[in-house]
Image (cartoon, rainbow, N blue to C red):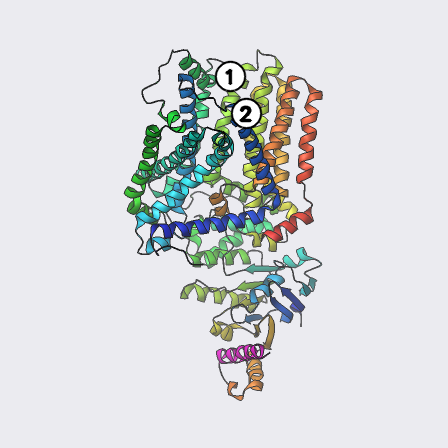
Amino acid sequence: MSLPFKPASTPWLLAHELRLAWRGFKAGRRGSGPGALIAFAVLGAMILTGGIFLGLGVRGVDVPIAPLVVAIADLALAVILTLMLSTTLAASADALYERNDLDLLFSSPLAPRKVLFVRALGLAVHAGLWFMVPAVLLLTPSILLGHWAWAGVFVVLAAAALGASGIGLLLAMALFALIGPRRTRTVAQVMAALIGAAFFLASQLRNLMGERRSESLFTRLAVDVNEGRVVLPPLADWPLRAALGQPVPLLAVTAIGAGIFLFAARVLGRRFADAAAATQGAETRKAARGPTRAFAAGAFRATMRKELRLISRDAALLSQVLLRVLYLLPLAFAMSRTAGHLPAWALAGPAAAVTFLAGQVSGSLIWITVSAEDTPDLLAISPTPVGVLLRAKLAAALVPVAALLAIPIAVLAWFAPLAALWTAIGAGLTAWSAGLIGVWRQKPGKRADFRRRRAGSFLAALAELAVAVLIGGATALAVAGWYVWALPPLIVAGAVMMALRRTDEQIAAALRAAS
Amino acid sequence: MTEALIVRGLNKTFAKPAVSDLDLTVHAGELYALLGPNGAGKTTTLRMVAGLTQPDSGEVSIFGVDARKDPAGAKALLAWAPDEAMIYDKLTPLEYLEFVAGLWNIEPRAAKAKAEDLLATLGLSDEARRRCEGFSRGMKQKVALAGALIHDPKLLILDEPLTGLDAAAARLVKDMLQARVDAGGTVILTTHILEVAERMADRIGIIAGGRLLAEGTLDELRGKAGEVSTQSRGQTLEDVFLQLTTEAFSEKVGA
C-alpha cells in the first residue's frame, strides 16, 4: 500500500517509520500469544480502576499550589525525565551503530536532518509511551469528571519526552565526539544506567552515608519544604501549573521540550549521518595477545564459556545488570549496618529486596542466554542434546548472579547467619524460578534484535516480577521469624509457576510456531 | 558401494509443496552437486537432511543411520554450512571453533590443534584472536567453513559455499573440498555457479519445483537432456540445466 504523502517529505518518512513500527509490533504480539494481551488488559483495567477512584475522590477538589505539592510535582517530573533520558540516551547510541535501513536512507537524496528528525521523534514516542499510557488510564476519569485542565499532564509528558529525546541525542553525539566511535556505545549504555538509577541513589544518599536508617532524601526534602526550612526557587511551580493546565506555564514547558528537540534534530542532522558512517566496523577490537587458553572440554563447558564471553561483551546487557546492582547497593549497605544490633525483623525488608533483585538480574541474564541465539541452526545440527545446551546456558546466567550476591549474603552471614540463610534460599528460589520461566517462555531471536526490542515476552516479565515479589515477601517473613506466614506467598508463587509451566513438547511447538 | 546419503519419498509443504516425493542417493567419497533454479527446494532438502527442518514424510539415512530415528547419531556424522555464515560476531574465530568442537565433543587438545591448522589453511591465522564483528562476508564464510570441518565430518553439506568469496578464497575453498573428497570424504553442495559443478562434481542432481528432474554424471545428464532434445548432446552443463528446468517449467504451466 502506498503512503498518502508527498514522497521524501517528512510526513511521508514518518508514515513509513510508523508502518514499520506497527508491523513490528504486530509481529511481536503474534509471537506472544493471548497471554500477554490478557496481562496488558488486566494491568490496564487495574490502573483505570484506580483512575476512577481517583476521579471520584478529587471531584470538585482543586489541587493547591502549595510548596509541598510543588516539590512533589517537581521531583516526580525530574524522576520521569531521568528515566526517559536513560531510555533515549541508550537508544540514541544504538541508533548510531545499528545499520538497519540507515545506510539506505543516508545514501538517498533525503536530507540527513529529516532522517534524524523522524528517528528522534521515534525515540521520544518510545520513551513517552511508558508514561503516557498509564497517565491516560489514570487521569482520564478525573478529566471527564470535571478536571479537564488536567489534560495538561499529557502535554507535559509529551514535552518531557521530546526534551529527553533531544538531550539523549545531544549527549550521545557529545560522547561520540569526546571518546570516539569505539567506546561510545558502551559508555552511553553505562551512563544511561547511571542516569536511570540517579534519583533512586540520590534518594538513598543518607542510607549510603550512614546518616540515618531508611529515610529517603526526598522525604526529608519534602518535609523541609513543607515546614518552610527550604525555600523553592522562582518558577519551581511552573511544572505543576503546566500539568494543571495553566496556559502560560504549559506553553513554556512545551516550548522548552519542543525547542530542545528541534535544536538537536536541526543541529545534529549532518553530524549524525557522519557519525553513523564512522561507526561502521569501529567496534572491532584489536587481536588479543598472550597465550591462548586451552579449549573447553565437552558441550556443557564449551557452551557455558561461550555464553559467559557473550555476556561479558554485551554492553547493553551489562548496563541493564548494572542498573539493578545500583539498586542493590543501598540495600546491602543498610543490611550490613543494621544486621549487628537490630532485631531480625528489621532485616526483613532488605532481605526481601535482595531476593527480589536476585530474581530480576537472573531473569535478565537468563532471558538473553536462553532466548538470544545467533546461530540456532548450529546448535540444532550438533549432536548435543538440547537439555545439555539449556543447562549450560542457565548455568552461565546464574554464575554472575551468584558472584554478585555472594558478597552481601556473606556480610549478612557474619552478623545474622539465619537471616543470611533465608536470604540465600530466597535468592536461589527466585533465580531458579526465573530460569524455569526463561526456559518455558523462551522467545528465540538474534542477539541484536533483543537489544533493539529491549524487552522480551511481556507475560514472562510480569510473571517473573510477580514470583520475585512473592518469594521476596516469603523471605522477609521467614527472616522476621514468621515462618507459617511465609507459606501462603510461596504457595501462590508455586501456583503462578504451575500456570506458566510448559512441557518439552509445548515448548517445541511454541518455538516452531514462532519460527 | 557405501551410500553416504539415501533420501526416499521426502515431502515437505509450507504454504505450497516445497519438496515432493524426492529420492536422492549420494555415494560415499563423492562430490555431489544439487542444482536448481531459485525456490527449487534445494535448501529445504538439505535442511531436512541436516535435521533442521522436519519432513512431512519420507526417510533420510546418513551412512546407514536413520536420521529421523537417531538424529544425534546422524548429526555426529555431518556438518552443515549455509550461505549465511553461522557465527557469533562477538567471538573470535578461535573461540568460535572451541565452541563448535565442544558441541561435537572433540578432545580439547586435538580440537585446538585442528582449529589452528584450519585457520592457517584458510589464511586466518592473523585474525584468529580478533572478534568476527569486523570481518568481511568472505572471512565470515571461511570461519564458518572451519567450524564445519573441525569435527572431521564424514558428510559435509554446503549451501552456496562460494557466495561472497573473492577469486582467491573461492579457489582455496574449492581446493579444500576437492582434497576432502580425494581423502575419502563426501561433500554435497548447492551452487548457482554451474561451472563449479561441471568441473568439480562427480554427480549432479537437478531439482525444480521440489522434484528431482535428473541425476547422474554430466554425460548421463547430457544423455537425459538429449532424450528431450537432440540439441543438448555435447553441450555444457548450463545448456543441459536450462533445457531440463525450462522443460519442467513448461510442463507445470501446461498442466
Please name whichever residue, A393 or B43, is drawn nearer the observer in this view of the structure.
Answer: B43
Chain ID at mark 2:
A
In this picture, residue A234 sits left or right of residue A214: left
Q: Earlier in the sequence, mark 1 or mark 2?
A: 1
Q: Main secondary structure of the magenta part?
A: helix
Q: Secondary structure at mark 2?
A: helix
Q: Residues within 10 Å of mark 1 (few under 14, many from 20)?
A: some
In magenta stretch: residue B188? no
Residue A249 in percent (x, y) is at 34, 28
Please name whichever residue, A401 or A80, is drawn nearer the observer in this view of the structure.
Answer: A80
* Residue at image location 57% in from the left, 63% down from the top: B157
In magenta stretch: residue B254? yes
Residue B73 in percent (x, y) is at 67, 57
* Residue at image location 43% in from the left, 57% down from the top: B137
Three-letter amino acid code of the residue under disc 2: Ile
Report the number of numbered marks. Answer: 2
Q: Residues within 10 Å of mark 2 (few under 14, many from 20)?
A: few
The residue pinned by badge 2 equals: A407
Q: Which residues are magenta?
A: B235-255
Q: CA distance from mark 1 to mark 2?
A: 21 Å
Residue A287 in percent (x, y) is at 41, 46
Residue farthest bottom in this picture? B230
The residue pinned by badge 1 equals: A214
* Residue at image location 32% in from the left, 42% down from the top: A265
* Residue at image location 30% in from the left, 46% down from the top: A269
Report if the CB atoms under discs 1 and 2 are less than 8 Å apart: no
